[in-house]
Structures are given as structure tokens and as C-alpha cells.
Image (cartoon, rainbow, N blue to C red):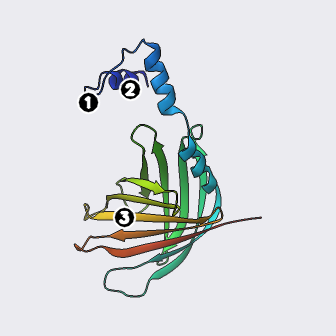
Amino acid sequence: MACGLSLHAHAGDGESTVPPDSADFQKAWEAYGAPGPAHEEMTKRVGDWAVEASSWVPGNDEPVVSAATADIEMILGGRFLRQKYVGSFDGTPYAGEGTLAYDNKLKVYKGTWIDTVSTGIMLTEGTYDAESKTLTETGKSIGPFPGANTKFITHYISDDHFVMTVYCDETGQMRKSMQLIYTRVTE
């Protein structure tokens, strides 16, 4: 972390820099690293979830539907949301893990996704609209044919229910590729 702090202070990105030994430098890092309202909003997703996953394969109008589970927790002092997803796709076991962060300086959400069908890492960036309770993220697809634009739209219906819809343009035109319906598991 010390190297990162030093690099940040001397990034040369056109912004003013603060000497690493100053009180202002310390305050800036404390503000940047402190969980805030966006992180508090993310805590509403913590828990165990049942997921109904629908996937549309190009050339097939009917989705492949499967059941999955998701364990969602806040990690690293409430700064990041981590999801552990376990299910199947067309009878083949599938698992993935994702993180969601809110960057206090950039004022955007950043996401990652890794899974058992690839060796790449999906990176996303997006914004949250509080009025519609919708998180919209964009990224580039991973896999043997990477680079397609991908859009994730997550609508938070209530604290116990949300829906993520995924759109991809691997053929040059955006199409709905997945819909994940999350319902909180209550004991």
C-alpha cells in the first residue's frame, strides 16, 4: 500500500499533488477510503439469494432457464460487495465471483466478474440512478471472442428482490443475453 500511496501522490495526472508526509495527504486518503452512502446502499444486498437465470443463445428464441444461488457479503471493512454465485448452464456446473465497488473520487461504480468458463476478468463501470433504483454498468466481454460491448442493468425492486438484465453486441447489435432474477432466501 505504501508504494500505491507514494505513486498516487506523484501521479502526474494534471491534478495537484500533495507531499506524502503532509496532513492533507493523510486526510485525502482517509476520505477516499471511507465507506459512504453508496456503500451503505450496497449493504442492502447482503445475504443469501435464490436466482432464476435465463440465458438466450444466438439463434434460439427460447431461453435456457436454470436455478442458482448467490451469497452476497460486504468485505474489507464495508468497502466492497462480493457475490459468490453457484448454478449451472444447460446442465453444466457453473460458478462465478464478482465484486462491486463505489469509487469515492471518480463517483462511479466499478465491477469485476470471474467464473468457471473463462480465464479472463470482466471489468465494468457504471452509475446508479436513485430515483429508478437502477445500476447501469458497461464493459467489454471476455472469452474466446472478446471485445463485444456488454451492458448490465440491475433494477432493485425491493430489499428482497432485484433483477439483472445483460445485453451483448457480439454480433454488432445489442441483444438481451441473460436475465437473473434474485429473491432473498429467508429462513
Residue 151 marker: 3
Nearest the eye: 37 or 3: 37
Residue lying furthest top? 21
Nearest the eye: 150 or 59: 150
Q: Secondary structure at mark 2?
A: helix
Residue 4 marker: 2
Q: Secondary structure at mark 1?
A: loop
Question: How many numbered marks, from 0 up?
Answer: 3
Nearest the eye: 153 or 15: 15
Q: Nearer the viewer, mark 3 or mark 1?
A: 1
Mark 3 → mark 1, Cα distance in angstroms: 29 Å
Residue 32 at what x, y percent from top left? Answer: 47, 32
Q: Does label 3 or label 1 sit earlier along the sequence?
A: 1
Give neighbour class at mark 1: few <14, some 14-19, many 20+ (Cα, 10 Å).
Answer: few
Residue positioned 26% across, 61% down in the render: 146
Residue on which disc 1 sits: 13
Image quadrant in which the C terminus is located = bottom right
Q: Amino acid at mark 2?
A: Gly
As drawn, is 146 to the left or to the right of 9?
A: left
Q: Does label 3 or label 2 sit earlier along the sequence?
A: 2
Q: Amino acid at mark 1?
A: Asp
Residue 54 at what x, y percent from top left? Answer: 48, 77
Nearest the eye: 142 or 33: 33
Give neighbour class at mark 3: few <14, some 14-19, many 20+ (Cα, 10 Å).
Answer: many
Residue positioned 51% across, 26% down in the render: 30
Mark 3 → mark 2, Cα distance in angstroms: 31 Å
